[in-house]
Amino acid sequence: MKLRELAYSRSGDKGEVSNICVFAYDPADYDRLSERLTADAVREHFGDLVKGPVTRYEIPTAHGLNFVLERALDGGVSMTLRVDPHGKAFQNLILDIDL
Amino acid sequence: MPPVSGPGGRMLTIGAGSAYANDRLEPAAAMADSGRVSYMGFDCLAERTMALAHVRRRRDPAAGQDERIADLVPLLAGYLSAGRKVVGNFGAANPDAAGEDFAKNLHAAGLRGVRIGVIRGDDVRDLVRDLDCELPELGTTVRALGDTLVSANAYIGAEPVVEALRQDAQIVLGGRLADPSLFVGPICHELGWALDDWDRVAHATLVGHLLECGVHSTGGNFEDPPYRVVPDPWNLGFPLAEVQDGSVVVTKLDGTGGAVDERTMKTQLYYEIHDPSAYLTPDVTADFSTVAIEDLGGDRVRLSGARGRERPSHLKVLVGVDQGWKATGEMSYGGPGCVERARRAEEIVRRRLERYAGEIDDIRFDLQGMNSVFGDRLQGGYPTEVRLRMAARTKDGDVARAAVHEMELLYFGPAGGGGAVGSVVPALGVTPAYVPRELVRLDVEVVTA
């Protein structure tokens, strides 16, 4: 099952760091999310788009997880030549992860 | 309009007026005309905006401020004549010019005697040069930038905003006032909260964080049909907040589209935040990790439980770096073989640009419709069309124009290319640095227009 079936997300940028927060639609799915949606799983899914470490923060009160992806924006919003310099679309790429 | 008494004590109602330098003005006008808010906070800056503003000021010493002031002031005339207040980082690279623009346009709108507070001192170019600050993302120091250093602005906090409000300013503006601080200032001033009362400052920062991105709290940057849709996304309004000690209700104006619900609040609450228990601003180290979110229905959400610790000892500075020019060019290919023809086109342009190899700092080609957003991370079937995109960075404007021209010349081969577009724009990078806060000297001047 794709993450998109269970959760919603938003990505943002600061310099060359991207953060993507992910929230379970149904609080009952939060345990499953936190078990399966590991930092390693996100790291692997994003592959060479991300050059630095991926850190996961748990936010149980919001049934959410926040992923911080370092060196994920090809030198940063203002430096990169990428089509999507902010990583706005990262919020959609993460939802394609197979849980 | 002072704070009113609410069920949980004194309450201040404050609204958003802008989320970036090019934001729409109609939602700001609607907020002003609603009669519901006594303050509006205008965030006019994104990371690159300051550097771009410095480039404008370099060309014209009277420029570098927000460019919407002349259009905005008439929309706020009724709001201001009712004594309501505005706080914004309209100053960008030139706070004094922004103050003058406000004064001139207030007079033109028939408003006299409005007190305008101008905050100066966020421009720290000399300081970062003197300290030869480290630039961690570039792995070098400021000195290595030489003449390519365009700007250096410290993110400054609510202190000077409160000072200007104490001096009866009705419009408070500065340069790189931090986004949440535009709201923290008025909230702490009106509700009588000390700026070292960390839990309360964190609560005010929570409010600022939820308002400073405008429609991001009301259904913008949120939809994913059919999973997530909001009503009338073509008519999103800005959020407003009813702030009390310990809790806040975020809502939106009646008659606007979008939604304020548990989901739109959560996505904004953790937007552009790294460690949720340590969100660093010039005002506080805020802990949003245990914020409680209560959806009251009817586009009203109550949030509470932000906690604060002492503010960081250093201020973040964004240093703008001139990197020359960025050239982009695009051409579309369709039908059978479109991918192969686009790849051939890339090869042609690469070969044609070989003569500039030493002058092009970086170049990339993408196939839009296949791999431009996620690289090879998602694989689809063979597309019905692709758009070849070239992007290059060079210090030489002529080389940039030549690269765009080569993309246009793809009309003559390989075959079937259509719809060329291209542009050459200044390439401005921004990169962070950190300076001890006590070295950043701020100045507040309140004048009667």
Image (cartoon, coloured by chain):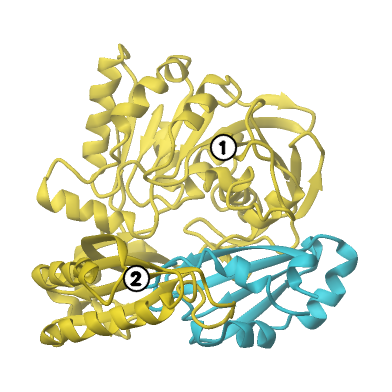
Chain colours: A cyan, B yellow
Chain for numbered disc 1: B
* Depth check, front residue: A75 or B377: B377
- Decide if residue B136 is in sight here: no
Q: As drawn, is B150 to the left or to the right of B176?
A: left
Residue B343's x, y, as percent? 35, 82
Q: What element carries label 2?
A: strand
- Indicate the quadrant where residue A89 lies: bottom right
Element at badge 1? helix
Residue holding disc 2: B389
Whether B220 is drawn above or below A40: the answer is: above
Residue A81 to residue B155: above or below: below
- Image quadrant in which the C terminus of chain B is located: top left
Answer with mark 1 or mark 2, whichever residue precedes in sequence: 1
Residue type pointed to by label 1: Trp
For label 1, the crowd category at 10 Å Cα-Cα, with few meaning under 14, some 14 to 19 and many 20 or more, is few
Percent coordinates x, y for residue B290 in the rendering:
75, 61
> Which numbered dot is residue B234?
1
